[in-house]
Image (cartoon, rainbow, N blue to C red):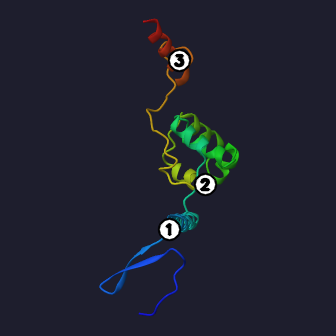
Amino acid sequence: MTARRLPKGIQIIEKDGKPAFAVLPYSDYLRLLEAAEDAADARFIKAFDASREERVPAEVVDRLLAGENPLRVWREYRRLTQDQLADKAGVSKPYLSQIETGERAGSAVLPRIAAALDLTVDELFVREEAPKYKTSKRGRGAASARSAGRNTARKAKRK
């Protein structure tokens, strides 16, 4: 084995005539450890940048987790008006508005809306609730689902 010139303070311990361990000053060890961590970080960043995953700001995630309508949250994040999104998805603005407010489920057009927003339908998932039909118990004008909900909440508070 040819003798190698080693930096000062480094020792090689052999086992069965072959190098088995290297003993080096602690400061050198720390520098090597930091360099290895930096290289691992650089590989991770390169792989992350190469991925096609979209990065979503915390504000968008917070709004979705707070229960806001995903269609509205994503539309606003993409900086589209209802008119622009309706045109892009091939639906009418009133229909899109009704889906955003929860008045209509819009199941048939969700794939087109999702595609217009560059999302999957799962990312755009709007909870389907029972249809909010306008009803009239007393034969007078129809009460909207929202005002009916407020009236129910008021009655519950009185009890």
Is residue 22 placed above or below 128 in the rendered structure? below
Task: For mark 1, give the secondary structure.
Answer: loop
| First-in-chain label (3 vs 1) | 1
In the rendering, which numbered label is found on residue 95?
none
Under mark 2, the amino acid is Ala
Note whether residue 144 is visible.
no
| First-in-chain label (1 vs 2) | 1
User: In x, y percent, where is residue 123?
Assistant: 50, 49
Q: Which residue is mark 1?
A: 25
| First-in-chain label (2 vs 3) | 2
Is residue 33 placed above or below 134 in the rendered structure? below
Residue at 53 percent of width and 17 percent of height: 150
Give the Cα separation between the discs numbered 3 and 1. Answer: 73 Å
Task: For mark 2, give the secondary structure.
Answer: helix
User: In x, y percent, where is residue 37?
Assistant: 52, 64
Q: Residue furthest bottom?
A: 2
Give the Cα separation between the discs numbered 2 and 3. Answer: 34 Å
User: In x, y percent, where is residue 125?
Assistant: 49, 45
The nearer-to-camera label among 1 and 2 is 1
Give the Cα separation between the discs numbered 1 and 2. Answer: 60 Å
Under mark 3, the amino acid is Arg
Q: Which residue is mark 2?
A: 116
Q: Which residue is mark 3?
A: 150
Mark 1 neighbour density, 10 Å: few (under 14) some (14–19) many (20 or more): few
